[in-house]
Amino acid sequence: MTNVIRFGVWAPVHGPRAALRDPDEPFDASWEHNKAVVLEAEELGFDSTLLAQHTVNPHLPDHDQLEAWTGAAALAALTKRIEIIAAIKPYIAHPVFLAKAALQIENISNGRFGINLINAWNASEFEKAGIPFGEHDDRYVLGREWASIVKRLVSGETVTHAGQHFKITDYKLTPQSPNRKRPTFYIGGESEPARALATDHADVWFINGQPLAEVTGLIADVRSRPRKGPPLRYGLSAFVVARETERQAQDAHDHLLALAARDADVHDLQGKKADPKAVMFQTMRKYVRVGTNGGTAAGLVGSYDQVAERILAFHEAGVELFMLQMQPLRSEMRSFAEEVIPRVRALEASPRAVALARRGAS
């Protein structure tokens, strides 16, 4: 087994994750709604929250989009225990100024902040702002240089750097974190450049939701690579539909799938904006699923007991942090906290845990 299982929730920064026109989950990407969700998640015992970073709503361009980094700073001040992770696209944030903002949120949160470096897929978000949207692998070249600078700056180093994309002279940022060396680095993406970048620079590698066998193979590949420093840890995005019985869960899943079908126009538009080389979309096309970032492809649809056992199976494969999507979000968070988390904790503490995990994998 790896470290203790942690549970997180995706903040609703651009509305619902499964169906955008769900009558039981009216669209709400407001600050007030995001604040209420994260404060309740903390109270319920969730360990982490992730704020996706977009300037305009990637699904419904005329709808609201919460700004991730100012939102993260505000949440850091309002919360006491939950980890706050903010995503960032290196192409739109200079490493010096992003590192300064990260250190500020790290200090506001008393050491509960994480930086999630993402390669980006939405070309129109860049192009409409007059920012060239580089080729997939070229974006990772920039991201690697960017990450190396940010990590050094938030670790207290004085940085002089002359690279392909950035030139920095004798830069040092203060104050540093009084709680630890630096914020946690999360990196997402499953392409070859993404795996290499995660191996070299991440503390935690985020994997999009997909079946256990696929996740096991991805982790095995990255674990086989030479790495300096502590072992890489692993997170998984997944959409959860858990009920008292498997039949009830499947019915709820099918209901969400039918609602999501009404968003066909949105998905068509998204496909036109997306980088075809983004592995996330290639993966999602393999599976009928609910949710984003792989969604229900991870298989967390079933009875409370089944979902708990499947979570343990992923944990046995190496996953530590489960970044979860649900809908309707707040009522499902409560149900998950009341029904699934206690079952997972009981399995973790049980000598039968490994056997159950392996049974869940079969």
Image (tube, grey):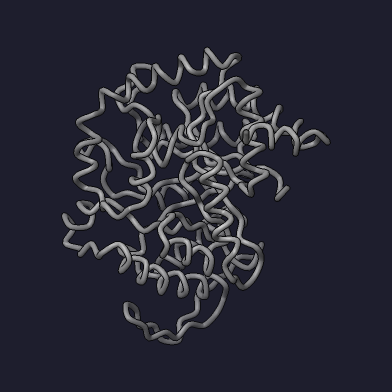
Asked whether, in this view, residue 5 is left or right of residue 120, the answer is right
Q: Quadrant of residue 127?
A: bottom left
Q: Position of residue 106 (x, y in %)?
A: 55, 59
Observer able to see residue 36: no
Q: Residue at x 39, y 82 (%)?
A: 168
- The answer to whether 171 is drawn above or below residue 129 in the figure is below
Quarter of the rendering containing residue 220: bottom right
Rendering coords of residue 270 (x, y %): 24, 41
107 vs 254, nearest the viewer:
254
> Would residue 303 appear left or right of 148 to someone viewing this image?
right
Q: Position of residue 150 (x, y in %)?
A: 47, 70
Asked where in the image residue 142 lies, by quadrant, the reply is bottom left
Residue 236 place in picture, x, y as percent: 53, 44
Residue 147 seen from this side: yes
- Residue shown at 56%/31% (left/top)? 40
Above or below, comparing residue 29 to residue 185 in the picture: above
Query: Which residue is situated farthest in the right direction here?
Result: 351
Q: Would you place residue 24 above or below residue 40 in this image?
A: above
For the point 40% across and 57% down, the residue is 118
Q: Which corner quadrant holds the C terminus?
A: top right
Which one is in front, 328 or 240?
A: 240
At a point 45% along the width and 69% down the height, the residue shown is 147
Q: How many marks?
A: 0
Depth check: give the residue in front, 11 or 220: 220
